[in-house]
Amino acid sequence: MWWETLLFFALGTCVGSFMNVCIYRLPRGLSIVKPGSHCPLCGTPIEWYDNIPIFSFLALGGRCRRCKAGISARYVLVESVTGALFAFAAYKLRALEGYSYGLVGAYLFLVAGLVVSTFTDIELQIIPDRITLGGMALAPVMSVVVPGLHEEFSLLGSGPGKERLDSLIACVIGIAVGAGMLYIVGFLGKLVLQEEAMGGGDVKLMGMVGGFLGWQGAIMTFFLGAIIAAAFGIALLLRRRQRVIPFGPFLSAAAVAVTFYGDEIWAFLAAVYAGGM
C-alpha cells in the first residue's frame, strides 16, 4: 500500500537523522545522547524546526541559520538513502511468504547498521564496534523473537519452540561463518602481502551480516561485495592514486542486495551453474 511505503520513508528519514549523529560521534568516542544537535562551528543548538529531515537542510540552503557555515551534504544524503531503503523494505518484503512487521523491523535494524558502517568507513576508515558488535548481540535476540528471519534453516524439525531454536542456531552459525570467513581471508592476505589486508571492522561487519542473513547470505555477501569492489575499486585506486580503499561500503551494498534479492541471486547463480554443466 502506498501509504505504508510513504510512512516507512518518513520513518527512515528520521532514523537517518539519528544515524548522522552516530556517524559523526561514534568514531570520535562522543556520546550520541548529549549534547543535543548543534552547529559544530558556532555551537548553536539546532531547534526542532531546523532539524526536520531533508526539508530543513533544503530550506536553510545547507547552512547554519546563525553563523551561515556550510553543512555537509552527507546529512541529507544519509537521510534520503535511509528513507529510500526503509520504503523499499516495506515494499519488497511484503511479497515474502513469512511477511510480518517483526521481520521488516529486523531487516531495518540491519540496514541502519549498514548505513552507519558505510559512511564512517568512507569518511574515517573506521567501522564502530558499537554498531557491529551491537548488531551481533542483537541478531540472536531478533532470531528468537522473529524466527522467520532464518526460516529456511531446519535442524530440529517442527514442534513448539523448535523453530525459534533453529533460528537461533542459524544465527550463530551465520555469525561464525561471516566473521570467520573474513578473518581467514585477512590472515592469508597478511601472509602474502606482509601488511594488513582486511580490517577488523570488516570482520565484525560480516559477523553482523551473517547473524541476520545466515551463513548462505554471508557467503553471498562476501563474494558479491568482492565483485562490486573489483568493479569500482580499481577506478577509485586509479583516480585517487591511493593503495587502500575501504571494503565496508562494498560489503554493505552487497548485504543490502542480498537482503532484498537473495532468492533471485541464488536462482541466477544456479541457472549459470546448470548452464555450465
Image (cartoon, rainbow, N blue to C red):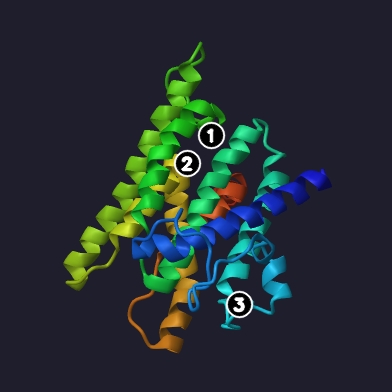
Q: Position of residue 252 (x, y in %)?
A: 48, 58
Determine which of the numbered discs, if any, sits on residue 149 in the image: 1
- Is 26 or 249 nearer to us in this picture? 26
Residue that appears at 39% across and 45% down? 134
Asked if one can make out residue 59 in the rendered structure from this viewpoint, the answer is yes
Residue that appears at 39% across and 70% down? 246
Asked if one can make out residue 253 in the rendered structure from this viewpoint, the answer is no
Q: State the SS at label 2.
A: helix
Circle 2 packing at 10 Å, graded few (<14), some (14-19), many (20+), is: many
Identify the mark nearer the N-term, 3 or 2. Answer: 3
- Is 194 or 252 nearer to us in this picture? 252
**Is 7 situated left or right of 174 in this image?**
right
- The residue labelled by disc 3 is 64
- Is 273 or 130 nearer to us in this picture? 130
Alpha-carbon span between mark 3 and mark 2: 39 Å
Q: Are marks 3 and 2 in contact (CB under 8 Å)?
A: no
- The residue labelled by disc 2 is 212
Q: Amino acid at mark 3?
A: Cys
Q: Amino acid at mark 2?
A: Phe
Q: Amino acid at mark 1?
A: Leu
In this view, the residue farthest toward the top is 160
**Which of label 1 and label 3 is nearer to you?**
3
